[in-house]
Amino acid sequence: MFNIGDYVINQKTGNLGKVIGYGHQILSSGYETTLKVLVAKSAICQKKGFLEEDLYSQWLQCQ
């Protein structure tokens, strides 16, 4: 599991940011863990400093 403060990148959106919290999402198979990430660099737009939440499995740790 990622720790608060780790930098991660989203596999779908390409957004890079810092983990600031955890959450959950209800799917047909039950609850799935999500990560709440403060985006520092967006692959989609010039905007930064926004919150992105996605399933834990969609994030990769940055080196």
Image: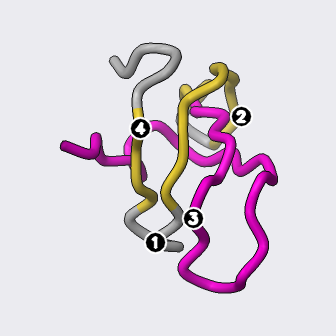
Q: Which mark is residue 41?
A: 3
Query: Mark 3: which amino acid?
Result: Lys
Task: Estimate the x, y position of residue 46 in percent, counting from the top left.
Answer: 72, 82
Query: Mark 2: which amino acid?
Result: Ile
Residue drawn where x is 65% and y is 52% of the image: 39
Q: Which residues are magenta?
A: 34-63
Q: SS of the residue at dot 3?
A: strand
Q: Mark 3 or mark 2: which is in front?
A: 3
Q: Which residue is mark 2?
A: 26
Q: Mark 4 or mark 1: which is in front?
A: 4
Query: Mark 4: which amino acid?
Result: Tyr
Q: Which residue is mark 1?
A: 14
Q: Is residue 6 left or right of residue 5?
A: left
Q: Which residue is mark 4?
A: 7
Q: Earlier in the sequence, mark 3 or mark 1?
A: 1
Classed neighbour count for the residue bearing mark 2: other residues with Cα under 10 Å, few (<14), some (14–19), many (≥20): few
Q: Nearer the viewer, residue 20 or 34?
A: 20
Q: SS of the residue at dot 2?
A: strand
Classed neighbour count for the residue bearing mark 4: other residues with Cα under 10 Å, few (<14), some (14–19), many (≥20): many
Q: Mark 3 or mark 1: which is in front?
A: 3
